[in-house]
Amino acid sequence: MSLEIQVMSVMKDAMKAKDEALLRGLRAIKAEIIKAKTEPGANGQINEEQEQKLLQKLVKQRRDSLEIYQQQNRADLAQKELEEIAVIEKFLPKQLTQEELEAAIAAIITETGATAISDLGKVMGVASKQLAGKAEGKTIAATVKALLSK
């Protein structure tokens, strides 16, 4: 089932339940899907990989906003961002724990034969592809750097 169909199904239930936080998050996802489908070359369709990237982008945007709101002591706006992040993350694959991420990256380092921080690019290329959607890029990069500098 496509992401758009899932979102629409949950949206109907959220409207009936009058769940404003859920509706905000779902509407944001729906808007991004429509925008992606109407981009030049999209031919009115997006694949599963594009859906995952779209969701990750939405979560990243909200985390960035959340950070700003917390710095400015705007708890009301920060709460809205947290609610939307929770809604969007329901549609993303389960994120890896730090231990699982470290184990996966250690395996990639062994596989690529990386030994020093100078091999960062080689490891990041493989890790970004293998762990796409399962961990945030910033977290992957930090973990790779930490493991290579040991």
Image (cartoon, rainbow, N blue to C red):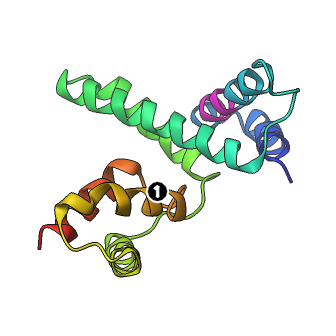
Nearer-the-camera pick, 69 or 149: 149
x and y, in percent, of residue 40 in the image: 77, 18
Q: Height in image: 41 above or below 67?
A: above
Quarter of the picture holding the N terminus: bottom right
Q: Which residue is depicted at the point 28% across and 28% down?
A: 75
x and y, in percent, of residue 93 in the image: 60, 60
- Mark 1 residue element: helix
Residue 92 magenta-highlighted: no
Q: Which residue is depicted at the point 53% across and 34% down?
A: 58
Nearer-the-camera pick, 53 or 20: 53
Residue type at the position of mark 1:
Ser
Q: Which residues are magenta?
A: 23-29
In the image, taking residue 133 as reference, residue 5 lies left or right, namely: right
In the image, taking residue 9 as reference, residue 138 lies left or right, namely: left
x and y, in percent, of residue 85 in the image: 49, 41
Nearer-the-camera pick, 27 or 128: 128
Pointer 1 local density, CA inside 10 Å: few below 14, some 14–19, many at least 20: some
Q: Which residue is mark 1?
A: 128
- Location of residue 70 (image quadrant): top left
Q: Which residue is depicted at the point 11% across and 74% down?
A: 150
In the image, taking residue 82 as reference, residue 138 lies left or right, namely: left
Nearer-the-camera pick, 87 or 12: 87
x and y, in percent, of residue 115 in the image: 21, 74
Residue 25 magenta-highlighted: yes
Q: Height in image: 54 above or below 143?
A: above
- Location of residue 33 (image quadrant): top right
Q: Which residue is depicted at the point 20% across and 68% down?
A: 148
Q: Height in image: 121 above or below 27?
A: below
Classified by dominant secondary structure, the portion drawn in magenta counts as helix
